[in-house]
Image (tube, helix red, strand yellow):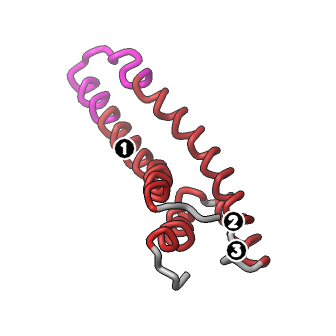
Amino acid sequence: MRIGKPLAIVIGLFTIWPIVYMLLFMGVLVVAALTIFQQAQQHRPPPGSGFLPYIFIPHIGTILLMFALIAFYIVHVFENAALKDDRRVLWAVVLFIGLPVSAPVYWWLFIWRPARGDASV
């Protein structure tokens, strides 16, 4: 499966989004916890639902994106002529189990480098 450079860039951005989102989500949780602790020390009532409505849609969107990425990468693994049969199964399992960590590695090795014209894959 040959993927052009512009499409490879878009796939790469989608691939790193779950990691970026996880860091943003943890930052929001830390800020929310610190805000709640500060308000508790000042004996103010808790702020209600707070950030939950704002984080719900990106959270669901990221989950759906990860399902789509799993499907894309599994299909790409089995259509990738650069992989031997035993490596296909290994990459499929690794991508299924650890997508946020393994997908950027797979993207770099088997999508970006061929799209760049680097024949040393």
Residue labelled with disc 1 = 24
Q: Is residue 50 left or right of residue 105?
A: left
* Camera sees residue 93: no
Where does the magenta region start and end? Answer: 33-53
Q: CA distance from mark 1 to mark 3?
A: 36 Å
Q: Identify which residue, 120 or 105, lies in the foreground.
A: 120
Type of amino acid under label 1 = Leu
Crowding near the residue tagged with mark 3, few <14, some 14–19, many ≥20 C-alpha atoms within 10 Å: few
Does the magenta segment cover residue 36? yes
Question: What residue is shown at x 74% (from left), y 65% (from top)?
Answer: 78
Residue labelled with disc 3 = 81
Per the image, label 2 sits on a secondary structure element best described as: helix
Residue labelled with disc 2 = 77
Question: What residue is shown at x 46% (from left), y 33% (from top)?
Answer: 58
Type of amino acid under label 3 = Ala
Q: Are marks 1 and 3 in contact (CB under 8 Å)?
A: no
Question: What residue is shown at x 76% (from left), y 70% (from top)?
Answer: 89
Crowding near the residue tagged with mark 1, few <14, some 14–19, many ≥20 C-alpha atoms within 10 Å: few
